[in-house]
Amino acid sequence: MRVRKLSLSLAALLAILGLPLALIGWNLHTFTRLTDEAPIATLRFERLAPRQYAVELRSGDFCQAQHYRLQGDQWRLDARFLKWKPIANLFGLDARYRLERLSGRYSNIDEARQQPTVAYQIGDKPALDLTDYLDDKWLSWSPVDTLFGSSVYQNIDPDFEYVVYRSQAGLLVRRHRLDTARFENGALVIPIRKCR
């Protein structure tokens, strides 16, 4: 009888200690899932003339480069997003996206009205696009939260590489100074880009 009471007490103590640990673990999982990010594109620029740039865009496996020419002092990347409801996201479904457009832009609105701009379609729309059939009635009972467009833009600086990320709520961008060939301890160091 005494051993049974001791084992029940121990089980109750473990349950009391285990429940907060399980809740903390679930909370951390929730935070991680809802703030998940993944790189989806990189952009590098080479100045051709004032406010004219050659652009190298890499996406997908990051091995195949696409080349464009932009005008302006900023770049902009647009994507179409499908966002899942939070419960679906917690069980592993990440936001889906399709890159759609790359364009140049001007930071000054008066110049944007007067100067020429260039835009490129960079993603192909599939022949059968299920998002065309998602209406409000279907969205109300499906795991899909919403469909929306998302864009990021930054000033163009050829000394930086821009990495575009997919988050659960849209696009975001971070820039990193480009590694250039340099001498270290009397040896020439040349950075090599690896495919992901």
Image (spheres, rainbow, N blue to C red):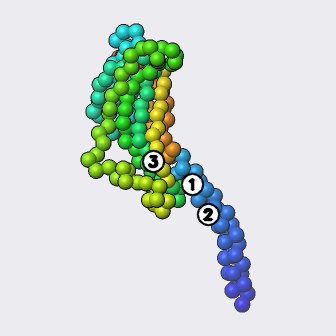
CA neighbours of label 3 inside 10 A, class few (<14), some (14 to 19), many (20+): some
- Determine the residue positioned at 36% across, 26% down: 119
Which picture quadrant has residue 193? top left
User: Is residue 37 among the parts visible in the rendering?
Assistant: no
Tag 1: amino acid: Thr
Q: Position of residue 37 (x, y in %)?
A: 48, 43
- Determine the residue positioned at 29% across, 25% down: 67
Return the disc, 1 or 2, that comes first in the chain's sequence: 2
Q: Which residue is mark 2?
A: 22
Q: Which residue is mark 3?
A: 147
Tag 3: amino acid: Leu
User: Is residue 121 among the parts visible in the rendering?
Assistant: yes
Q: Which residue is mark 1?
A: 30
Q: CA distance from mark 1 to mark 2?
A: 12 Å
Return the disc, 3 or 1, that comes first in the chain's sequence: 1
In the displayed structure, would residue 87 be above or below residue 107?
A: below
